[in-house]
Amino acid sequence: MSLKAVDGILSSLKSCQTDLGTGMDIVTDIAMDLAETQMEAMILECAKLDSEINYFVDIVQQATAEVTPQHPEAMFSLSAKVKEQFAERITQLSNADLNNHQKVAAFKESIKNSLQVEMVNPMKNKKCNHHYDEEAILSLIKTKQSQKKRCPVVGCGNGDVKESDLIPDQMLRRKIQNQKRQSNKT
């Protein structure tokens, strides 16, 4: 077997490695899309429950305010009246109402902002090993100076991200730069 054959095989392996990297990126993107979709469904469900609780509290307060001690017979119809008004109010709850809920809007905005930030200067958190863009994470830390900053990675248990925990990740930076160069070539 000649050395040229070995070089050809190594070149093929390197090409496969590039394809594997692309495949892993695709899998990661799909996983993030699925996680985002599931999280959005969960936050919409929470917003629905929050709205239902608010409706119920309002209806019960209105109904009990209407009942006076002089009319005790009104107490017997109170439960039915509350159930009827609650059912009517729930049917009026629309998807637009849920999407306009303060927490849902904040969730969607945070997803949009996190997806729009292109990582330029990657920083690695020494505690949880997650990566962030330097500008984005330092901005988060500075805007919430008086309170603990949770790691923005969903599901991470690191409840206090500090600037002192962050280190530049030169290897990831090189990977990002190489990926940019490759995408500019195509």
Image (cartoon, rainbow, N blue to C red):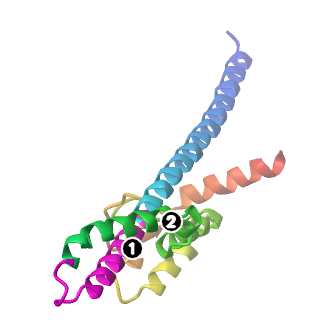
Instruction: Indicate whether residue 142 is drawn in magenta.
Output: no
Q: Is residue 47 left or right of residue 33?
A: left
Residue at image position (45%, 81%) is 141
Q: Residue furthest right?
A: 186
Please tell me whether mark 2 sits on a helix, a strand or a loop. Answer: loop
**In the displayed structure, does residue 59 sit left or right of residue 116?**
left
Report the residue marked by disc 1.
55
What's the amino acid at mark 1? Tyr
Q: Earlier in the sequence, mark 1 or mark 2?
A: 1
Mark 2 Cα-neighbour bin, 10 Å: few <14, some 14–19, many ≥20: some
119 w.r.t. 64: above or below: above
Q: Position of residue 186 (x, y in %)?
A: 83, 45
Circles 1, 2 touching at the beta carbon (< 8 Å): yes
Residue at figure coordinates x 35%, y 79% from the top left: 58
> Horizontal and vertical percent for residue 156?
36, 60
Q: Main secondary structure of the magenta part?
A: helix
Q: Count the marks: how many?
A: 2
Which x, y percent locates residue 182? Answer: 75, 47
Q: Is residue 125 visible?
A: no
Vertical arrangement, residue 67 with respect to residue 7, above or below:
below
For the N terminus, the quadrant is top right
Q: Which residue occupies the foreground of this view, 2 or 120?
A: 120
Which stretch did the figure color magenta?
47-73
Disc 2 marks which residue?
93
Does the magenta run of residues contain 51? yes
Q: Residue furthest top?
A: 1
Residue appearing at x 57%, y 66% in the figure:
114
Q: Amino acid at mark 2?
A: Leu
Against 91, residue 109 (above or below) is below
Toward the viewer: 158 or 14?
A: 158
